Image: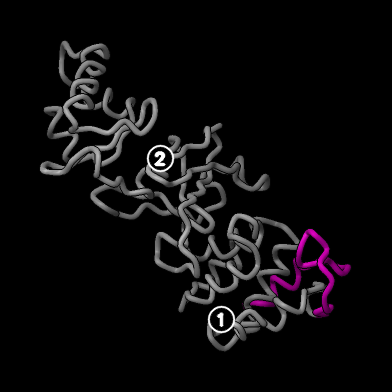
Amino acid sequence: MRAQDYFSSHPVFTHEEFLASRAETPGRSWRTADSLLAQHVAAGRLLRIRRGLYASVPPGASADGFLVDPYLVATKASPDAVVAYHAALQFRGKTYSVWHRYTVLSRSRVRPLSFQGNEYAAVCPPAALRDREDLGGGLVEEPHAGGMVRVTTLERTLVDLLDAPALGGGWEEVWRSLETVEFFDLGAVVAYAERLGSALTAARVGFFLEQHREELFVEEEHLKPLRALAPRRARYLDRTRTPGKLVKGWNLIVPERVLDRTWAEVA
């Protein structure tokens, strides 16, 4: 495959991926590949995002003004990167606020990246799932902007955000973002929460589903396994131990602002 053909079909790619595409052609060395990449960067046909990561500039576009799709960049942050948390909701247009920070799950050590006004950061998968080949499931690849984006499903994202609300911007942003989603596969939500195995997170998920019972068509069959996982003693919803009211069904002490969703009153 000619280099230009490769670039036109790979909007964002890594150095290793480009080398692999050239390996099928006899006589092609890594030095030749590096020289080609450098030539195309100099000619404005490629953008160097960081060492080993490139974006193709479409014909007719200027390298200085071309904006690279951030979800494609996030997916290529590491070989196993998966767009997650707030970024996974934003990918599907389901967030209350628009962010320019993109979080990915990755087992690899990934240095934070700043590019074209966007920030990219990697977090380790939850400890209970880190050694699973599929990281506990709920990972999909979806076509986007001429490439493929690895991203968590809406169901996994719901649980992940309630497990690590700081990665979603705190309770108000998490609540209001999740409330823009019209439908969840509740069986998948419960199954992933069970795999995660956190009593506190199971209670948070159960409380959220119960609070949105009518909108999300939640049945007792969905709540029962979450109640079985919930803490036996009262726990604070927030790790900062914000005072609130005890929701006995979940043994959660919930701040009144979350319990009553008072932020909606001043929206």
Task: Give the x, y percent position of residue 190.
Answer: 61, 68
Splitting the image into 4 quarters, where does residue 174 fall?
bottom right
**Figure check: 161 above or below 267:** above
Q: Residue at x 81, y 67 (%)?
A: 242
- Is disc 2 placed on a helix, strand or loop? strand
Q: Is residue 112 above or below residue 148?
A: above
Q: Classify residue 246 by image quadrant.
A: bottom right
* Residue 76: x %, y % from top left: 39, 39
Q: Residue 68: within the magenta?
A: no
Work out whether residue 244 or residue 221 is closer to the camera in this orientation and state it: 244
Q: Name the residue furthest right.
A: 233
Q: Residue type at mark 2?
A: Phe
Kindly identify which residue carries mark 2: 115
Identify the residue at horizontal 53%, vertical 86% (top origin).
Answer: 215
Q: Which residue is more in the foreground, 45 or 246?
A: 45
Name the residue rendered at 67%, 47% in the picture: 128
Identify the residue at image location x=38%, y=50%.
71
The quadrant of the picture occupied by the N terminus is: top left
Is residue 82 shown left or right of residue 46? right
Q: Is 210 situated above or below 127? A: below
Q: Position of residue 263 (x, y in %)?
A: 63, 79
Residue 267, numbered label = 1
Q: Position of residue 179 (x, y in %)?
A: 53, 76
- Give the residues drawn in magenta, as a range: 222-248
Q: Residues within 10 Å of mark 2 (few under 14, many from 20)?
A: few
Q: Secondary structure at mark 1?
A: loop
